[in-house]
Image (cartoon, helix red, strand yellow):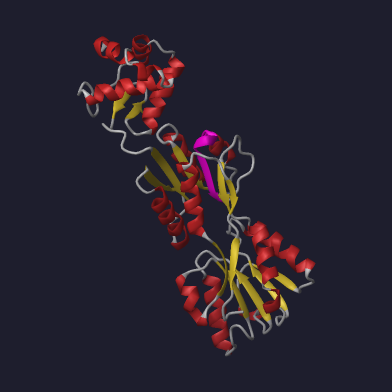
Amino acid sequence: MKELLDSQTRSPNLQQRLKYMQLVDYIMAQIAQNELAINDRLPSLNQLTAALRISKETALKGLQYLSEKGIIESEYRKGYYVKRLKLEQRFRICLILDKMNVLRDRVYQAFLETIDDQAEVDVYFHHHNFKVFEKLVEENLNSYTHFVVVTFFKEDPSHVLNSIPPHKRIVIDHKESSLNGTYSCIYQDHQSDIVDSLTTLLPQLEKYKRLILVAPLEAFHAKDLIEGFEAFSKEHKKNHEIIHQVESDSFKKGDAYITFSRYDQDDVDIIKLCREKNWKLGQDIGLISYNDTAVKEVLEEGITVISTDFRKMGEEAANAILNETSVTLRDPAKVIIRKSL
């Protein structure tokens, strides 16, 4: 150990590196010379600090760096063990999504395409279970260079997100409040989006007597959409109503519906009621649906949508990591007008 250390500390290039990188270089040199292999235990913290003449704080930074890169893993009360032999990628990223669907797949694919071969990416899902999310972050906190996170919880996740150092934290889709430090956030502003989108659609909405927002009770962004919908309706003096599900008894000619149900069930119900009553979608009944899909492009000759560019969300998150910059970007929705309005 001493001979290897002496040969390293004589190197002028090593003296120019950050102090904690002395430990990193030392461990990587031991691996390269086959003095450490997979599952071997590293020297203790006290041994490393004494041999390298660095502080415990500096040594811990070096060990954290190696943990983030996946070279070593810590075992409670046992120490650190070698888990990988090479620093293959520049970044190790923990991508935590709420669920996987068509829209999240766009985020995921765009993120992977943009990050390319510069990072190792592990994907986890919390399915809106706060305890699962909390455990995922807690158990992996020192194992990744960055965390890219989608939230949407009934609980306040700020204390969990704040446990992630700001420079490692990228929050996407939903802008959380009460977060510390300078971090990256690429988000939707649902309240502003619905106001802007309905304003764009004012000429198409003129022929309808009433606007109806179908707001499922379980939707995490329902509050923002309701506030934006009411603000728009008040400003433009639109007869409007907020309901939680589509019902046959209240289905009337001259209504224009705005829907954002998770599985597009409200769209299906509206189309079925139109067929049942022999009414024409886009004339007797209007329909505006959130989030574009290939099906909505062709269904009933096309469904008008308000949709965010989810691919851009993934691209910008990846670029923030690659460029090592902190960004705050709103990913605004756009309107695609089709026959349903």
Q: Is residue 128 visible?
A: no
Q: Is residue 182 magenta?
A: no
Relative height, residue 248 to residue 154 (above, below): below
Image quarter (top left, top right, bottom left or bottom right) of the N terminus: top left
Looking at the picture, how far across and down is residue 89, in whole percent?
34, 39
Looking at the picture, how far across and down is residue 264, in whole percent?
52, 69
Q: Looking at this view, name the residue that lies furthest to the front.
A: 12
Q: Is residue 18 visible?
A: yes
Image quarter (top left, top right, bottom left or bottom right) of the C terminus: bottom right
Q: Is residue 74 left or right of residue 172?
A: left
Q: Is residue 253 left or right of residue 94?
A: right
Q: Look at 55% across and 87% down and name the residue there.
A: 276
Q: Is residue 18 left or right of residue 182?
A: left
Q: Look at 36% across and 33% down and name the residue there.
A: 69
Looking at the picture, how far across and down is residue 294, in whole percent?
45, 71
In this view of the protein, which residue sits in the foreground, 223 or 118?
Answer: 118
Q: Look at 54% across and 37% down and name the residue there.
A: 160
Relative height, residue 114 to residue 245 (above, below): above
Q: Look at 68% across and 62% down and name the residue there.
A: 226
Q: Looking at this view, name the residue that lies furthest to the bottom.
A: 278
Q: Quadrant of residue 50?
A: top left
Q: Quadrant of residue 291?
A: bottom right
In this view of the protein, which residue sits in the foreground, 61 or 22?
Answer: 22
Point out the stretch of residues depicted in magenta: 163-173
Relative height, residue 317 to residue 104 (above, below): above
Relative height, residue 255 to residue 142 (above, below): below
Looking at the picture, how far across and down is residue 205, in whole percent?
69, 77
